[in-house]
Amino acid sequence: MKCPSFVIRPDNAAVLSVDHQDKVLEHVQDHETVLSQAVNLVKVARLAGVAVMKIEHCPDKLGPTNRVLAEAMGPVPAYPKVTWSAFRNSEIEAAVSALGVRQLIIFGVECHICVCQTTLDALDLGYQVFVVADAASSIKPMDRDIALARVRAAGAYVTTAQAAAFELIERADTDLFRRAHPILKLM
């Protein structure tokens, strides 16, 4: 039986962390929760064998991805960008395309700028996008709320880190679930 396309499939998905850099992250609403949920989702994604990409906006000015999140991601390269949308950078677009997946799980800061524009461009490129609401934020709550409504109206699915993690795990009777269970309890 074919699963509906609106379910995250671990064999067809990749995680994109967009601009989780301390110089921005520390100013957004609920930044502790945003970071914690991002870290836990990345840990589960890696356990499930899902590719994770680290995208950084102007890292020469804003610094690298938060250390705790970068450690959870493991030895993956950082993809720098100066465009708001990651997909307006040909190196990032090529790297995502090379993964050979059709579903993208996107989170980051600021939600109404880089996350929103990356999501809209990904949709235009034919990707199915899942935006992780509790791992994405903006300085102003209204900006975040409007961005989530906008990407939803454009065709992205808005979800939570825990919901995405459970979709990546798929079942309760596996070693993957047993290994991920302690992380899931933190989400």
Image (tube, rainbow, N blue to C red):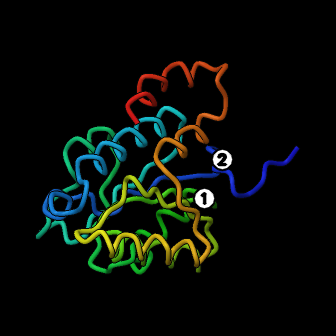
Q: Quadrant of residue 173?
A: top right
| Element class at badge 2 | loop
Image quarter in which the N terminus is found: top right
* Label 1 Cα neighbours within 10 Å, binned few <14 / some 14-19 / many ≥20: many
- Which mark is on residue 9? 2
Q: Earlier in the sequence, mark 2 or mark 1?
A: 2
Residue 155 locus on image (x, y percent) = 62, 73
| Type of amino acid under label 2 | Arg
Q: What label does residue 103 carry, if any?
A: 1
In the image: residue 151, left or right of residue 89: right
Cα distance, mark 2 to mark 1?
8 Å
Classify residue 125 by image quadrant. Answer: bottom right
The C terminus, quarter of image: top left
- Where residue 113 appears, as percent x and y from the top left, is 33, 77
The answer to whether 63 is drawn above or below residue 51 in the figure is: below
Horizontal relation, residue 38 to residue 56: left or right: right
